[in-house]
Image (cartoon, rainbow, N blue to C red):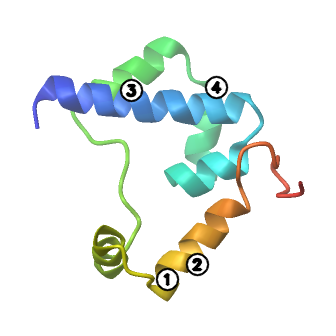
């Protein structure tokens, strides 16, 4: 992966995280993006310069959390129960539902 590609990927990830947090969708940001409480707190407080600096760090900011089995099923279009569970969990944090999941 080229340095520029990694920077672009990181900056996109951090931008989405910041936007979700800024709109009060903390729980959604944590589920979709895998943000810990501490990292979410940092992203909320970080300056744009700090976010860009982290994006340029040369380290991938995002780490996939799905198991190989789930990823394999997703790419085959299978209906793995674990994958369906992920879909159900994501539905509870759909846009407009707020932090408490209430509609």
**Image coordinates for residue 59, horizontal then vertical, percent:** 25, 39
Of circles 1 and 4, the one toward us is 1
Picture quadrant of residue 102: bottom right
Q: Residues within 10 Å of mark 4 (few under 14, many from 20)?
A: few
Closer mark to the observer between disc 3 and disc 1? 1
In the displayed orientation, state which residue is furthest to the bottom: 81
Q: Quadrant of residue 9?
A: top left
Q: Nearer the viewer, residue 80 or 17?
A: 80
User: In the shown orientation, is residue 52 left or right of residue 37?
Assistant: left
Cβ–Cβ under 8 Å for marks 1 and 2: yes
Dot 3 or dot 1, earlier in sequence: 3
Residue lying at 70% horizontally and 52% vertically, measured from the top left = 94
Name the residue carrying label 2: 85
Q: Crowding near pointer 3: few (<14 within 10 Å), some, many (20+)?
A: some
Residue depicted at 28% across the width and 24% down the height: 56
Give residue 89's position: percent from left, percent from top.
65, 68
């Amino acid at each position: 992966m080229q340095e520029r590609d990694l920077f672009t990927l990181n900056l996109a990830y951090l931008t989405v995280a910041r936007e979700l947090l800024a709109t009060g969708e903390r729980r959604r940001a944590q589920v979709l993006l895998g943000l810990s409480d501490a990292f979410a707190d940092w992203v909320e407080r970080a300056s744009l310069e700090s976010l860009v600096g982290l994006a340029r760090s040369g380290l991938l900011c995002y780490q996939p959390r799905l198991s190989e089995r789930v990823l394999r099923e997703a790419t085959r279009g299978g209906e793995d129960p674990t994958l369906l569970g992920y879909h159900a969990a994501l539905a509870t944090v759909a846009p407009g539902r707020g932090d408490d999941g209430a509609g």
